[in-house]
Image (cartoon, rainbow, N blue to C red):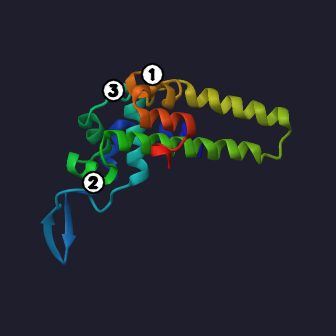
Amino acid sequence: MTIAESSRRCSPGSAKDLYGPDVHHYGGARNRRRPGRSPEYNRKAAIRHALLIFWRHGYAGTSLAPLSAAMGMKRPSLKAAFGDKKAGYLLVLQCFRKELGEVVAQFARSTQTTSETLEDLFRSAIDMYSATAQRPGGCPILCSTLDNAGSDPEIRRFLSDGSPGGR
């Protein structure tokens, strides 16, 4: 699955689909859902939803309220799962970069001619970076760091060497 395909599958409105009903069975008794993160929590989908929010609003323009709403998590659960806003942002960028690398690696392993492979790669890039109803256009890393995210030393380090915190 390409990044563009995975981005299309996670519109902000579908974050509610990450969780089951409000009521779960614990030990045979029917109880209201326990507070905090749901047992059906889907980390990968939550990261995709966070990517879309940062992509649309940038790092500085994103607060915890839209992140928690899009990810279907309450703030305490969000903080427990991803840390603070910067840690979550760096994780989102790291996951996107890894996924992008996997897509490029697939093209590198292609058995097509170089010309056909490059044509497919460029078509995929055009599709991924073109705006749709579900996602904004452009590169999510560049679009989300054009505000003051680049002034943060840890984010700058990630952008230059790909490792948050220099790890």
**Badge 2 element:** helix
Vertical placement of residue 74 versus 155, above or below:
below
Work out which residue is located at the far bottom of the displayed protein and give it.
Answer: 27
Front in this rendered view, residue 92 or 52: 92
Tell me which residue sits at (31%, 48%) in the image.
83
Residue 11 drawn at (x, y percent): 40, 37
Mark 2 residue type: Ala
> In terms of image quadrants, where is residue 92?
top left
User: With 131 as the anchor, is 23 left or right in this view?
Assistant: left
Residue 136 in sight from this viewpoint:
no
* Sooner in the amino-acid sequence: mark 3 or mark 2: 3
Residue 142 drawn at (x, y percent): 50, 26
Mark 1 residue type: Leu
Question: Where does label 2 land, which residue?
Answer: 80
Vertical placement of residue 132 versus 75, above or below:
above
**Badge 1 element:** loop
Count residues near mark 3 (Cα–Cα under 10 Å), then give few for <14, some for 14-19, many for 20+: some
Question: Where does label 1 land, which residue?
Answer: 146
Tell me which residue sits at (21%, 47%) in the image.
74
Tell me which residue sits at (52%, 34%) in the image.
159
Mark 3 residue type: Ala
**Badge 3 element:** loop
| Label pair 2/1, CB-CB below 8 angstroms | no
Count residues near mark 2 (Cα–Cα under 10 Å), then give few for <14, some for 14-19, many for 20+: few
Count residues near mark 1 (Cα–Cα under 10 Å), then give few for <14, some for 14-19, many for 20+: few
Work out which residue is located at the far right of the displayed protein and give it.
Answer: 113
> In terms of image quadrants, where is residue 99?
top right
Q: How many marks?
A: 3
Question: Where does label 3 land, which residue?
Answer: 60
* Sooner in the amino-acid sequence: mark 1 or mark 3: 3
